[in-house]
Image: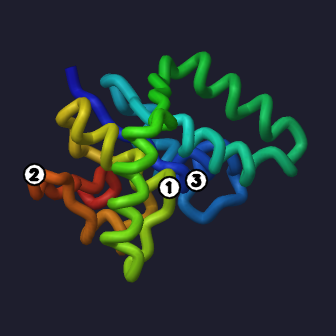
Amino acid sequence: MRAWLLDTGPLVAYLDASEEEHLEVAARIDAFKGQLFTTSAVITEAMHFVAPARRGALLLAEFVAESGLQVLNFSQAEDLMEAAHRMEKYRDVPMDYADATLILLAERLEVFDLLTLDRRGFSVFRSSRGNYFSLVLDQA
């Protein structure tokens, strides 16, 4: 089964039709027949962006429930330490906590197809084994 990791930007763009990337992201997500994965940090970040909009929080919750999006948590001490090390390593890019948890998720699942709008960051970031991310929006 195909699997994609989902970053904050596309999640927000999918839910907010006023976002510039909405149509492209919606077309990709709606056509995808695999499993979507993300982290609780991404959900928290997305909730921050969509909550001010009328029904924004509810739309995000409904998307998670209806899409079957699998949300994994990386808030245990070992995960926090690893995320912090990644953030330090890539501080000049920069890398935020949600980005770091997506890298940990990619390593755990061995999935490197990522739906993100952060081309700058994720074209630089690598797994601990040197794996590159395949940016879904750049695929034909």
Q: Quadrant of the C terminus?
A: bottom left
- In the image, residue 109 lies at what x, y percent? 24, 30
**Residue identifier under label 3:** 22
Location of residue 9 in the rendering, given as x and y in whole percent from the top left corner: 54, 55
| C-alpha separation, residue under disc 3 versus residue under disc 2 | 33 Å
Q: Nearer the viewer, mark 3 or mark 2?
A: 2
Q: Looking at the picture, how far across and down is residue 56, in whole percent?
A: 79, 40
Asked whether, in this view, residue 102 is left or right of residue 110, the answer is: right
- Location of residue 113 by image quarter: top left
Q: Depth-wise, is mark 3 or mark 1 nearer the camera?
A: 1
Amino acid type at image mark 2: Arg
Of labels 2 and 1, earlier in sequence is 1
Task: Measure the C-alpha gap from mark 3 to mark 1.
Answer: 24 Å
Of the pair 42 and 82, the residue shown nearer to us = 82
Residue 129 is marked as: 2
Q: CA distance from mark 2 to mark 1?
A: 20 Å
* Left or right: 112, with 5 as reference point: left
Disc 1 secondary structure class: helix
Colouring mode (rainbow / by chain / secondary structure / one colour)? rainbow
Is the residue under label 1 in contact with that under label 2 (CB below 8 Å)? no
Q: Quadrant of the N terminus?
A: top left
The residue at the point 50 percent across, 55 percent down is: 97
Secondary structure beneath label 3: helix
Residue 140 at least partly seen: no
Residue at (45, 61) in percent of width and height = 117
Q: Which amino acid type is marked by label 1? A: Tyr
Counting residues from the start of the chain, the first of labels 3 and 2 encountered is: 3
- Kindly identify the residue that appears in the image at 34 percent across and 50 percent down: 82
- Expressed as whole percent of the image width and height from the top left, the position of residue 125 reads 27, 64
Question: Which residue is the site of mark 1?
Answer: 97
Amino acid at the residue labelled 3? His
User: Label 1 neighbourhood size at 10 Å, few (<14), some (14-19), many (20+)?
Assistant: some
